[in-house]
Amino acid sequence: AGTYSPNVNLSNVDVTNQNSAGLAITIANSALSALDKIRASLGSVENQINATVQNIQVAQTNITQAESSITNTNFGTTTSKFSTLQVLAQAGTYALAQANATQQLVLRLMQ
């Protein structure tokens, strides 16, 4: 029996005698073995790509959640500061109005 060579084709082998038929079987078995190795290699690469895609999807989900948390936190902080400043502005306006009213009352009393 011979060994497989990539340049040997089964169509070139004469299978009319036992030795040639044995060579054809050896060539076919070697080709199948090479094909199995290629399939295993491709399967391994496919599994690595699938794992990488899943990792990227998890990272994308985590980034989206983190971005959402940051946005919500900033919005809450900004809203809280705005409300505080708005109350202070209203209190200042009220105090100024009361101060003006007190001055006007004093002037009326003096008249």
Image (cartoon, helix red, strand yellow):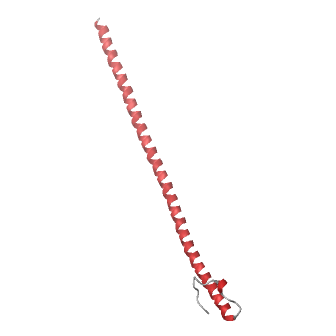
Q: Is residue 88 left or right of residue 57?
A: left
Occupied quadrant, residue 4: bottom right
Seen as rendered, the residue at the extreme left is: 110
Q: Is residue 29 left or right of residue 97?
A: right
Q: Is residue 21 above or below residue 35?
A: below
Seen as rendered, the residue at the extreme front is: 12
Q: Is residue 103 left or right of residue 74?
A: left
Q: Quadrant of the C terminus?
A: top left
Q: Is residue 32 above or below residue 55?
A: below
Q: Residue 30, percent across and down?
A: 60, 85
Residue at image position (39%, 36%) is: 81
Q: Residue 12, percent across and down?
A: 65, 85
* Front in this rendered view, residue 89 or 25: 25
Q: Is residue 60 above or below residue 78?
A: below
* Front in this rendered view, residue 18 or 102: 18
Residue at image position (39%, 34%) is: 84
Q: Is residue 110 left or right of residue 44?
A: left
Seen as rendered, the residue at the extreme bottom is: 18
Occupied quadrant, residue 18: bottom right
* Front in this rendered view, residue 13 or 39: 13
Q: Is residue 100 above or below residue 4?
A: above
Residue at image position (52%, 58%) is: 57
Seen as rendered, the residue at the extreme top is: 111
* Front in this rendered view, residue 22 or 57: 22
Q: Residue 78, percent across and down?
A: 41, 38
